[in-house]
Amino acid sequence: MKYLIILFSFTLLHATNAFSQITLRECEDSFRQNNLLLLAEQYNINAAKAAVIQSRIWELPYLSGEFNAINPQDRRVLEVGSHGQKSLAVQQLIYLGGKKKNEIEFAKSNVVLAELQFEQLLLALRYQLRQDFYSIYFNQRKIESISAQASRLDTLITAYAVQVEKGNIPLKDLVRLQSLSLNLRNELIALRRETIEQQNELTLITGLDQSISLVVSTEELQLSYQKTIKFTPDELLTLALDNNPEYLSYLKIMESNELYLRWQESLSTPDLTAGLSYDQRGGAFGNQVNVTVGIPLALWNRNRGNIKIAEAQLAKANIHKDFKVQELRSRIRSAYQIWEQHFNQYGLYSQGVSNLDDVYNTMILNFRKRNISIMEFTDFMESYNQSMLQLNEMHKQLILSGENLIQLVNTPVF
């Protein structure tokens, strides 16, 4: 079983080495060009703009005509000549009460709302991309660290196996080293499985076909660990209220509902129908030309139901907007505190672990020289492995917590 695990890990290691290398900026460029969800969301903007075009269009003029079919007096059919009878009329619906203007303004507000929803999706997917990117990168560093430990440990196990066969070392010492190696291999498998899942998600977001290996500038990363936030939580909330597309969409929904209410109120005003008519012989005069005017009598339909619905939707949107302010305030304060904890933790422990690799190499050397016991060595290896994993996780969480704040505020905060 142990050899199967080692073989599987070896295969995954070679698969990882075959990945195409890509930077964060290249990932984001590919994401904007290839992400299918973004491409689909753009059609909502196009549809909203088409709705504005449609809202500008008035009702078509209505043309009607009347022609003689049977003249019973002279016993003729289709008497439509100069001595016959025919009439024509054309009518046009004229909107009153500003309803057409209100309809256009409402349609325009939906365009802005569609653009904000697109930006909201863009920001959410970009945030997920950066979360996956840094998670994969730090997982790859964990994999490299554990793989190096496992490789050195395998060399020791090979040497110990020879000594066990010669009877110079007890078998239990070899078994203890093999058990430690097996634990490292199991951690490698778990990390690689997690990394594969994140890589699949990243390739889906970016639209890349090939597997990818991430490249990060260690100098830039080291500088990002030391950056401090320039704003207080209250200042961050103010920035978020100006830049967060999710909150701005709630504002636009409220404005859109206000326009919708105004439109429904204007619909209670009856519209005028005006036109011209021509009657050859059926009127009071020959070849009579008339002006026609018509308007509904607003006796029992004043559009009250739709107005009440629009008022309720506006009140609901206003409450949602207030709730979003509370939610943003809570999330920003929480995200700020989490980042602050990770930043302080980094400041406390980053200097203390700078010589950890030197200690590790010294322990390996002393163990080979038989200066320390197998118990001391394996205990140190387990502690070293946990320390390296925790240090790597500390760096990752510091970066991710900063990304969380940037996503909430939607503006640089460092």
Image (cartoon, rainbow, N blue to C red):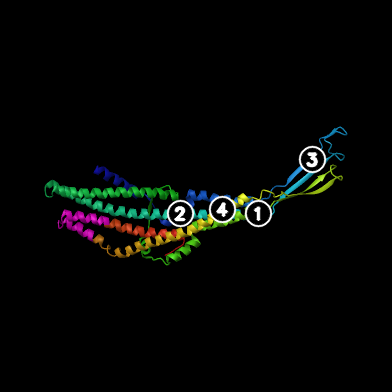
Asked if the residue under mark 2 is in contact with the one under mark 3, i.e. CB atoms within 8 Å, the reply is no
Q: Secondary structure at mark 1?
A: helix
Foreground residue, 200 or 18? 200
In the picture as drawn, the residue positioned furthest to the left comes out as 167
Amino acid of disc 2: Ala
Q: Name the residue that disc number 3 marks.
A: 66
Please tell me which of labels 1 and 2 falls first in the chain: 2
The answer to whether the residues at label 4 and label 2 have Cβ atoms under 8 Å apart is no
Residue indicated by mark 2: 124
Q: Is residue 244 left or right of residue 181?
A: right
Q: Nearer the viewer, mark 4 or mark 3?
A: 4
Q: Earlier in the sequence, mark 3 or mark 2?
A: 3
Counting residues from the N terminus, which is met first, the one under dot 4 or under dot 2? Answer: 2
For mark 4, what is the residue? 312
Mark 1: which amino acid? Ser
Q: Count residues near mark 3 (Cα–Cα under 10 Å), then give few for <14, some for 14-19, many for 20+.
A: few
Percent across and percent down for residue 350 are 30, 63
The answer for how far apart the CA atoms under marks 4 and 3 are is: 48 Å
Q: Quadrant of the C terminus?
A: bottom left
Question: Element at badge 3?
Answer: strand
For image coordinates 19% across by 55% down, the residue present is 377
Looking at the rendered structure, the secondary structure element under dot 2 is helix
**Which label's residue is closer to the chain start, 1 or 4?**
1
Q: Is residue 86 depicted above or below 187 in this figure?
A: above
| Secondary element at tag 4 | helix
Q: Looking at the image, do the residues carrying marks 1 and 2 touch, with CB atoms under 8 Å apart?
A: no
Q: Amino acid at mark 3?
A: Glu
- Of tags 3 and 1, the one toward the viewer is 1
Looking at the image, can residue 188 be seen? yes
Name the residue beneath numbered marker 1.
266
Q: Nearer the viewer, mark 3 or mark 2?
A: 3
